[in-house]
Image (cartoon, grey):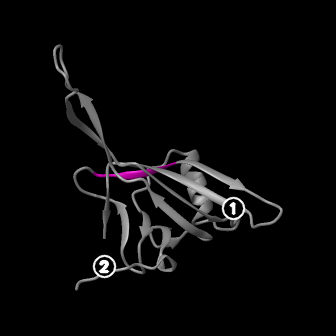
Amino acid sequence: MTRATSLEGKNCKVSIGSSKILGMGNWTMSGVTTDQIEDSEFEDEWKQFKLGLKDGGTATFNGQYDKTDSTGQDALRTANENDTELTDLRFYVDATSYWVPTTTNPASYCKIISWDISSDKNGLVQASFTAKISGKLELL
């Protein structure tokens, strides 16, 4: 019997190129969605649809806030302020494989569309980021 190859979350990370974003402990990608365009007409009994454009979705990631992480968390906040197109934002699924914007048809990128910092008296200060995926990601 063949078994699925399980991946351990402890081996994951988020990075900008080779620079790990410090403190992160969770990431989620929403996945691709496809627009549904209604193609119905008078006298139809059921709605008809055609498929439209694809949307690369979003990626969210969060963890412990680190005010000294100049090549990670601070770089993401700066990218948000400057509307920077990140082509090297990587979401690792293990020690060597990661999702990253594709460089081919279509050339893709991520933009940081929001970031938040939160605190609770009974916990560690947290940071969270949301990236909008323009185009698609590929697994390398």
Q: Name the residue under label 1.
A: 126
Q: Residues within 10 Å of mark 1 (few under 14, many from 20)?
A: some
Q: Which residue shows up at 24% across the image and 36% down it?
A: 52
* On screen, residue 45 above or below 81: above
Helix, strand or loop for the magenta stretch, by majority: strand
Q: Where is residue 36 in the image (x, y as percent from the top left)?
A: 27, 34
The residue lying toward the viewer, choosing from 53 and 38, is: 38
Q: Which residue shows up at 30% across the image and 79% down it?
A: 4
Magenta extent: 107-112
Q: Where is residue 118 in the image (x, y as percent from the top left)?
A: 72, 55
Nearer to us of marks 1 and 2 is 2
Q: Position of residue 128 (x, y in %)?
A: 61, 57
Q: Mark 2 points at which residue?
A: 4
Classify residue 122 by image quadrant: bottom right
Q: In this view, does 100 lie to the left or right of 132?
A: left
Q: Which residue shows up at 62% across the image and 65% down it?
A: 63
- The residues tagged by marks 1 and 2 sit, at their Cα atoms, a distance apart of 33 Å
* On screen, residue 75 above or below 14: above
Q: Which residue shows up at 38% across the image and 52% down it?
A: 109
Farthest top residue in view: 42
Q: What kind of residue is marked 1? A: Gln
